[in-house]
Image (cartoon, rainbow, N blue to C red):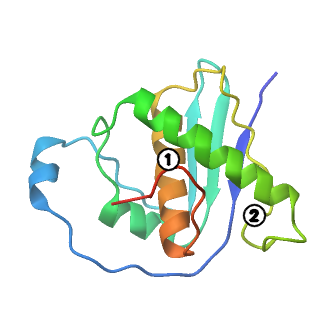
């Protein structure tokens, strides 16, 4: 049975800032995204993330830290807190904008999604908070 972690948000936004070159020299394996629909999958455990957002690709290519910049445990700890708050807001559509929190994220704390799924989920949640001036709690997102 295939389970899906799905993020769906269509937005139009732009961020501009300067990034440091010393991190790019240290980590050379950051993926370059080319599409507005991103699919990240861990086929071994049959989980995937779909991100449909016109602004995320350009933000990711400009600002996201490369793979292995953060440890998997760091990513998981941030994702647990942020996804919990995201899901709370998604269920309270009368209190929070349903256009921002259209659906819940099926992220279970006892499942090892692997590095790639956690990495992309973390980056999307940082992007979302920075571009929409939202704070999902616990940790302040930074680039």
Q: Which residue is mark 1?
A: 122
Relative to the observer, which residue lies in front, 74 or 112? 74
Quadrant (top left, top right, bottom left, bottom right) of the N terminus? top right
Q: Could you classify mark 2 by the number of other residues whose Cα lies within 10 Å: few (under 14), some (14-19), or many (20 or more)?
A: many
Place residue 4 in its image quadrant: top right
User: As displayed, is residue 4 above or below residue 85?
Assistant: above
Label 1 element class: helix
Place residue 129 in its image quadrant: bottom right
- Decide if residue 50 is on the left or right side of residue 23: right
| Comes first in the chain, label 1 or label 2 | 2
The residue lying furthest to the front in this view is 138
Tags 1 and 2 in contact by the CB under 8 Å rule? no
- Decide if residue 83 is on the left or right side of residue 91: left
Residue 31 is situated, as x and y percent measured from the top left of the image, at 34, 48
Quadrant (top left, top right, bottom left, bottom right) of the C terminus? bottom left
Question: Which residue shows up at 9% across the image and 54% down it?
Answer: 22
Question: Which residue shows up at 76% across the image and 50% down it?
Answer: 87
The circle drawn on residue 48 is none
User: As displayed, is residue 15 above or below residue 85?
Assistant: below
User: As displayed, is residue 49 above or below residue 109?
Assistant: below
Relative to the observer, which residue lies in front, 21 or 95? 95
The circle drawn on residue 101 is 2
Q: CA distance from mark 1 to mark 2?
A: 16 Å
User: As displayed, is residue 76 above or below residue 20?
Assistant: above
Label 2 element class: loop
The residue lying furthest to the right in this view is 94
Q: Could you classify mark 1 by the number of other residues whose Cα lies within 10 Å: few (under 14), some (14-19), or many (20 or more)?
A: many
Residue 94 is situated, as x and y percent measured from the top left of the image, at 90, 71
Question: Which residue shows up at 57% across the image and 75% down it?
Answer: 132
Question: Which residue shows up at 45% across the image and 57% down it?
Answer: 140
């Amino acid at each position: 049975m295939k389970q899906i972690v799905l993020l769906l948000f269509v937005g139009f936004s732009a961020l501009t800032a300067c990034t440091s070159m010393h991190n790019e020299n240290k980590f050379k394996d950051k993926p370059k995204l080319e599409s507005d629909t991103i699919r990240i999958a861990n086929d071994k455990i049959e989980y995937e993330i779909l991100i449909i957002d016109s602004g995320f690709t350009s933000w990711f290519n400009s600002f996201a830290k490369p793979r292995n910049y953060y440890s998997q445990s760091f990513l998981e700890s941030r994702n647990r807190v942020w996804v919990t708050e995201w899901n709370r807001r998604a269920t309270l559509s009368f209190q929070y904008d349903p256009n921002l929190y259209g659906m819940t994220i099926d992220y279970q704390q006892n499942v090892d999604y692997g590095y790639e799924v956690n990495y992309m989920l973390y980056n999307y949640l940082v992007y979302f908070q920075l571009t929409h001036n939202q704070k999902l709690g616990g940790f302040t997102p930074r680039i």
